[in-house]
Image (cartoon, rainbow, N blue to C red):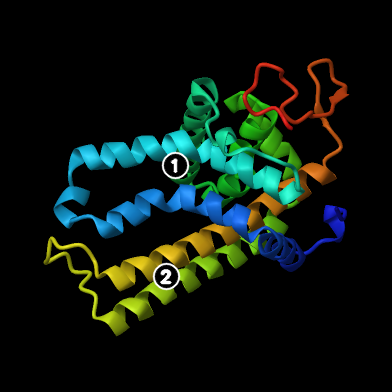
Amino acid sequence: MSNLKQLSARVIAQEGFDSFLANIPSFGLIALLSVIPSILTLIVDKEIAANPFFFIFIALYGLAIQPGVLYLSIRTSEGSAWSITNVFVGLKTTFLYFVCSMLIGLLSIVSLLLLLVGGLVMVRFQFALWLLVDYDLGPIEALKESWRITEGRFWLLSRYAFILILIVVAFAAVLAILGFVLGVNFSGGSSAPLPLGFALVSSLSAIFFTGLVMSMHARAYLNMIDSSEGSAGDDGGTKTLSPNNNPSSPLSRV
């Protein structure tokens, strides 16, 4: 992998795109696992989608599956083997993932309330969840490591984030155009599910765009790790992170 200092946001994005094309079946499966809640929301009656129990199910599914989705994306991007069972990371990692997510959200809100740059927090902490899953870290250590590996790279990552935003906008445009062509009613006046054709095409589009974004972000994360020389140790020295070398971790590399 190239030295990050020689990379631009475009090159990082291109690496992610190339990785996606080289691993379409794997990223397609990863994306499918991620967008199942969205697909269910499209195909069920709106009354069911508005049911609190349905919302709770969707929330619990997302919480249970998302850590494993990050793990599978990393392994796919670096060319390592994995099993579909790796998507289930265990209660401990899932709980720590949830805690870390809440901390990132809280820090972002506080930074905005204090008139600090909220984007700075989001950019610098964006890899904390990936580190937590990949290196079996605790939430605080993951936040510290994310802050460390993104030091001096705020503008590079901001430009890269802009590219990701363009991809999301493109996805939204595809759905809007498709909905217009099919005459889909988004006003919520009907409880009937969306037309099958729209649901099918939008689901396939969601799988494609989600897989692409996961691939790009995994490559950006690996670039950050690859360019990092180690983290500060408690004794003032340095230590090198070793991805999931905890024998008891369900995410140990194959």
Of callouts 1 and 2, which one flags the residue occurring earlier in the amino acid sequence? 1
Q: Is residue 213 visible?
A: no
Q: Residue at x 82, y 41 (%)?
A: 228
Q: Amino acid at mark 2?
A: Ala
Left or right for 37, reference 148 = left
Horizontal and vertical percent for residue 208?
53, 64
Left or right for 126, reference 244 = left
- Graded by Cα atoms within 10 Å as few (under 14), some (14 to 19) or many (20 or more), the crowding at tag 2 reads some
Q: Residue at x 54, y 68 (%)?
A: 167
Q: Residue at x 28, y 80 (%)?
A: 182
Q: Is residue 72 above or below residue 171?
A: above
Horizontal and vertical percent for residue 20?
66, 61
- Graded by Cα atoms within 10 Å as few (under 14), some (14 to 19) or many (20 or more), the crowding at tag 1 reads some
Residue annotated with mark 2: 172
The answer to whether mark 1 and mark 2 are in CB contact below 8 A is: no
Figure quadrant of residue 237 = top right
Q: Is residue 190 above or below residue 93?
A: below
Question: What kind of element bears circle 2?
Answer: helix
Q: Amino acid at mark 1?
A: Ile
Q: Nearer the viewer, residue 46 or 237?
A: 46
Residue annotated with mark 1: 109
Q: Nearer the viewer, mark 1 or mark 2?
A: 2
